[in-house]
Amino acid sequence: MVTLRQQKSARLKLQILKAALNLVGKNSFEELYVDAICGQVKVSKVTLFKYFPQKDDILLYYLRVWLLHRAVELSKTEYVGLVGLRFLQEKLCDSFMNHPGVVLGLVSYLTSLKRPPGPVSLKTAERIQLYSVEELENVEIRSLHQLVENFVLEAIFNGEITKRSDTNEIANLFLSVIYGTLVTAHLNQIAPIKIYMKRNLDLVLDGLR
């Protein structure tokens, strides 16, 4: 059972994330100041750092919430194989267009040599702030790599991918294209991102059929 205290903590944590996204907008995550978040949510720095010891931890929390959204959406669909991969492609592009600074900040953080990304979990109280208990039933949050690898396995089983190769290697190839597309689109100001992403994935798929 979720207590009132846990509900309050969950609401505050999600409010901090929402405030961070609103304040960043389409700007760089590096330009986001903790003071600004505290001012919008009306909490002290001590309280904010209780939930997010480092500002970059907000990026990992954003990713975990993003993955929860995808898990719930996928639980309501029958997307398999390449259709599932296209679904992830679409959602990633939407996120990039809405919050490019956050997405690029996340990629930068995940590839940083400073320290490995710490584990981030979503507590039950946080999940039910976003979805009903019924919607969360049998929902498992998977990493982006796990989602891609699962769709790749289905694509191979369905004959959409015919080239013989290790499933993990193909999943890594797709992830390389996804991350590379986002970074290259930013560096070279390529738009629209959805068409650019689709073209790159199509080129990869052509080599796997």
Image: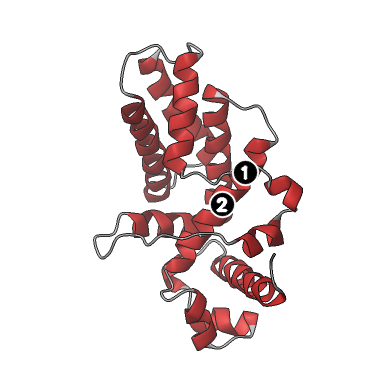
Secondary element at image label 1:
loop
Give coordinates of residue 101: x percent, y percent: 47, 60
Q: Secondary structure at mark 2?
A: helix
Sequence order check, earlier mark of 2 and 1: 2
Q: Which image quadrant for residue 6?
A: bottom right
Q: Quadrant of the N terminus?
A: bottom right
The reply, left or right, for residue 145 in relation to residue 64 is left
Residue 150 image point, x, y percent: 47, 30
Residue bearing mark 2: 66
Label 2, label 1: how far apart the Cα atoms are: 14 Å
Compare residues 89 and 2 and report the one nearer the observer: 2
- Residue type indicated by callout 1: Val
In the rendered view, would you say 75 is above or below 111?
above
Q: Identify which residue, 125 or 67, lies in the foreground.
A: 125
Give the class, few, some or many, for how many residues have Cα within 10 Å of label 1's Cα (few <14, many ≥20): some
Amino acid beneath label 2: Trp
> In the displayed structure, would residue 49 be above or below residue 170?
below
Q: Is residue 171 above or below residue 185?
A: above
Kindly identify the residue that appears in the image at 49 percent across and 37 percent down.
Answer: 147
Q: Residues within 10 Å of mark 2 (few under 14, many from 20)?
A: some
Q: Which residue is mark 1?
A: 139
* Residue at 69%, 72% in the rendered image: 3
Q: Residue furthest front?
A: 1
- Residue 10, compared with residue 122, is above or below; it is below
Q: Residue at x 63, y 36 (%)?
A: 74
